[in-house]
Image: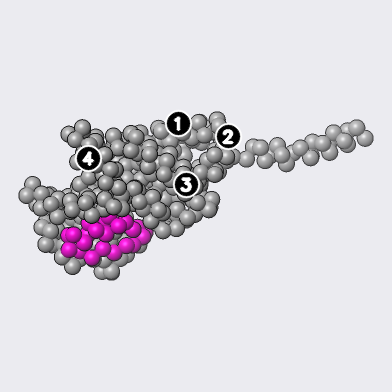
Amino acid sequence: MRLSHLLLSFVCLLPGAVLAQQPIVIKFSHVVAVDTPKGQAALRFKELAEKASQGKVKVEVFPNSQLYKDKEELEALQLGAVQMLAPSLAKFGPLGVKEYEVFDLPYIFPNKATLTAVMDGKIGQDLMQKLESKGIKGLAYWDNGFKIMSANKPLRSVADFKGLKMRIQASKVLDAQMRVLGANPQVLAFSEVYQALGNGLVDGTENPPSNMYTQKMHEVQKHLTVSNHGYLGYAVIVNKKFWDGLPADIRKILEKAMADATTYERAIAQRDNELALDAIKKSGKTAIYQQTPAEAAEWKKAMLPVHKEMEGRIGADLIKAIGQEAARNK
């Protein structure tokens, strides 16, 4: 009888013991290819988090819009369908945090030093804090570099944009940027851009070279201009309720893994863009044009009024603060 009671006690305890051994699952969804800086960094975070937690955490990475497209992923995070994302900074404007659209302003970052100072300093942290009211916890800023323009015609002067249908992310700033160039902005999910370029739904787009190459956009774009007119970066975010519910020791492990993955991601971003541009050139499918100083100045003169136009939406003080960082990092 005593033995049977011991066996019964063991069986009753077994489900709880098994449950305790189940890893914490983090579904990490993103919309770009595995071989982009973001894609590689997501896998590095997975590796670091799983190793450091000794199996207590399992990170499942879903690239290339496997789970959700641009417009869907933030809602999925807020609902808890996924735990982690790394959306482009432009996506927070439609969510109601319009200040993030400051990153979309053309020519706001004259160099990487200014960008890093903004992301890692008080400005970047204050912006992260604004996400918490939306049920989102910001963990890190990831880099994807400066953007080029592409189309099926040469883009040298501002006049070359007139009437072109140019794909953009859902950003009022990017909409205004294309309109001052004389183009017609078209909002499309990232996963739909290649097909839209191929069938003529849109004429051109803007992207860092690594995005253009890994999505094979160079196969359906005859010309690109290395303009570096704007910036594309990401914020790695988690569902705040999920994050706050984690044990403190697990949060500490994940914070360290994220910090290390961020260092890695920023180190490879510039290299990958350079390699992508070289690969596009070698493909022979897209003509690459380097701007003259006069052409760059003309583009800048055309687009800078967007800063003033967006002061009421983004905040004049925020735009001014980034200008001050730029002055310090000349």
Q: Does residue 64 appear in the picture of this structure?
A: no
Point out the stretch of residues depicted in magenta.
Answer: 170-191
| Type of amino acid at the residue the image marks with label 2 | Pro
Does residue 10 lie above or below 175 as drawn? above
In the image, which disc is placed on residue 133? Answer: 3
Mark 4 closeness class: few <14, some 14–19, many ≥20 residues within 10 Å: some
What secondary structure is found at the residue carrying circle 2? Answer: loop
Task: Determine the CA span between mark 2 and mark 1.
Answer: 15 Å
Of marks 3 and 4, which one's residue comes earlier in the chain? 3
Q: Amino acid at mark 3?
A: Ser
Task: Name the residue tied to disc 2.
Answer: 247
In-front residue for pair 156/91:
91
The reply to whether dot 1 and dot 4 touch (C-beta < 8 Å) is no
Between discs 3 and 2, the one toward the N terminus: 3
Question: Residue at the right extreme?
Answer: 1
Mark before the other along the chain sequence, 2 or 1: 2
Q: Percent position (x, y) of residue 212? A: 27, 53
Mark 3 → mark 4, Cα distance in angstroms:
27 Å
Secondary structure at badge 3 equals helix
The residue sitting at 31% across, 53% down in the picture is: 313
Of pointers 1 and 4, the one earlier in the residue sequence: 1
Q: Which of label 2 and label 4 is nearer to you?
A: 4
Tell me which amino acid carries mark 4. Answer: Gly
The answer for how far apart the CA atoms under marks 1 and 4 are is 31 Å
Q: Residue 88, how many percent across, how many down?
A: 35, 49
User: Mark 1 against mark 4, which lies toward the viewer?
Assistant: 4
Q: Residue at x 23, y 54 (%)?
A: 309
Marks 3 and 4 close (CB-CB < 8 Å): no
The answer to which image quadrant residue 216 occupies is bottom left
* Residue that label 4 marks: 323
Q: Are marks 2 and 4 in contact (CB under 8 Å)?
A: no
Q: Quadrant of residue 15?
A: top right
